[in-house]
Image (spheres, rainbow, N blue to C red):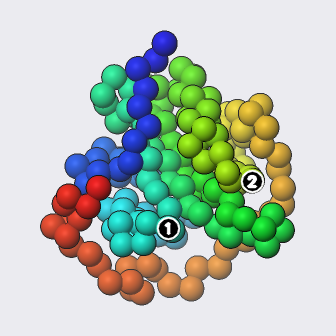
Amino acid sequence: MLDLCFRPFRSTDAESVQQLVDGLLNAYSAEKLVKPNIVRTFAEFTRYPDKGQIVVIEYNQQVVGYAILIFVWTNELGNYVLWIDELAVHEKYRSLGIGKRFFSWLQSTYHSSPAYSLLVSENNFRARKFYEEIGFNPLQLQMLKVNHIAEQSLPIIEEKELIGAV
């Protein structure tokens, strides 16, 4: 059995998780519109915890993955849907059952959510196959129009403000 742990992100995770974020962006994003910053996301969720959470995936006490979970109200279901904004497991640790264990953990932790939603890159066939195997169904085309880069619109929170936040 894998020695796995799913836990909240801490500021000390920033470097290792940022490397996973960059790897995900480089591997599957056709258009590099922005450079995501995990510390900025952590700051936002620390300030507004009802918006979402970053979950760190540890294997043998080493960070091997992460997920960004966003809580989104949907009129159709009359409740909050759990939007999995990002989910990544380091290449070296794929096909070990970590994804299945993550979704089992998600189900037990967020059992009141009527649905989970996520995006998967068109060319990420392996992830698409996995998601379909665990019950996700293709829904519709999502479109995005970038109006501005986030750094220009939100105040920056300094790292020292985050220490001890979680």
Decide: is 152 above or below 27. Answer: below
- Disc 1 crowd, CA 10 A, few/some/many (<14, 14-19, 20+): few
Residue shown at 64% from the left, 56% from the top: 82
- Residues 18 and 46: in front is 46
Q: Position of residue 33 (x, y in %)?
A: 52, 70
Between disc 1 and disc 2, whose residue precedes?
Answer: 1
Seen in the image, is 156 located left or right of residue 100?
left
Seen in the image, is 142 located left or right of residue 96?
right
Q: Amino acid at mark 2?
A: Pro
Q: Position of residue 118 (x, y in %)?
A: 67, 53
Q: Amino acid at mark 1?
A: Asp
Quarter placement of the C terminus: bottom left
Residue shown at 44% from the left, 66% from the top: 49
Label 1, label 2: how many angstroms apart (C-alpha)?
A: 17 Å
- Residues 54 and 122: in front is 54
The residue beneath circle 1 is: 50
- Disc 2 crowd, CA 10 A, few/some/many (<14, 14-19, 20+): few
The residue beneath circle 2 is: 114
Seen in the image, is 83 located left or right of residue 61?
right
Residue shown at 60% from the left, 48% from the top: 110
